[in-house]
């Protein structure tokens, strides 16, 4: 088993675990973390595919896509955490007004 195969299997495993956790949990913060884990798995699969195609000269286009994906992931995570914070604050305000 080559390094590319190991990264491919780990990436698929991370993507599956993150997706399962995303579907099964109800907590908003845990969903954001699960989405990050699944996204990291997908990015790892892309790196593994780029490596497996030609280990001496990896595909630079796929590596550029991964770097772009990392930037997008950080941006989406920040937005999602801000939304989670607002939703939880609104839920607390709603509960306080009912008491």
Image: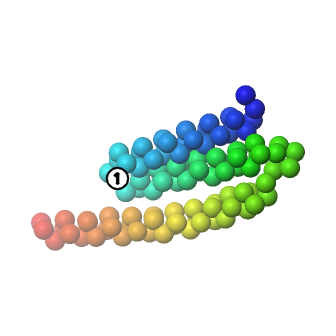
Looking at the picture, tell me which residue is in the foreground, 2 or 14. 2
Q: Please give the count of numbered marks on the rendered protein.
A: 1
Circle 1 sits in a helix, a strand or a loop, which is it? Answer: loop
Indicate the position of residue 68 as horizontal and vertical percent values: 67, 65
Q: Is residue 64 above or below residue 6?
A: below
- Foreground pick, 80 / 54: 54
- The answer to whether 99 is drawn above or below residue 10 in the figure is below
Q: Residue furthest right?
A: 56
Q: Residue at x 75, y 42 (%)?
A: 52
Closer-to-camera residue (19/91):
19
Pointer 1 local density, CA inside 10 Å: few below 14, some 14–19, many at least 20: few
Q: Is residue 16 left or right of residue 89?
A: right
Instruction: Name the residue at 75% across, 60% down.
Output: 61
Q: With respect to residue 95, does 48 lie above or below?
A: above
Please state the horizontal and vertical placement of residue 25, each as a whole percent of the image: 35, 47
The structure residue drawn at horizontal position 75% and vertical position 32%, both measured from the top left corner, is 2
89 lies left or right of 78: left
Q: Position of residue 60 (x, y in %)?
A: 79, 58
When asked about the image quadrant of residue 64, the answer is bottom right
* Residue hosting label 1: 27
Q: How is the image coloured?
A: rainbow
Q: Residue furthest front?
A: 53
Q: Quadrant of the C terminus?
A: bottom left
- The residue at 25%/65% (across/down) is 92
- On the rendered image, what quadrant is the N terminus found in? top right
């Amino acid at each position: 088993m080559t390094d590319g195969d190991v990264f491919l299997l780990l990436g698929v495993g991370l993507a599956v675990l993150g997706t399962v956790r995303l579907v099964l949990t109800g907590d908003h913060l845990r969903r954001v973390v699960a989405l990050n884990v699944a996204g990291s798995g997908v990015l790892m699969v892309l790196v593994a595919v780029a490596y497996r195609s030609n280990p001496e000269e990896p595909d630079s286009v796929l590596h550029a896509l991964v770097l772009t994906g990392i930037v997008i992931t950080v941006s989406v995570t920040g937005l999602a955490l801000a939304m989670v914070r607002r939703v939880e604050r609104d839920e607390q305000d709603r509960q306080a007004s009912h008491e």
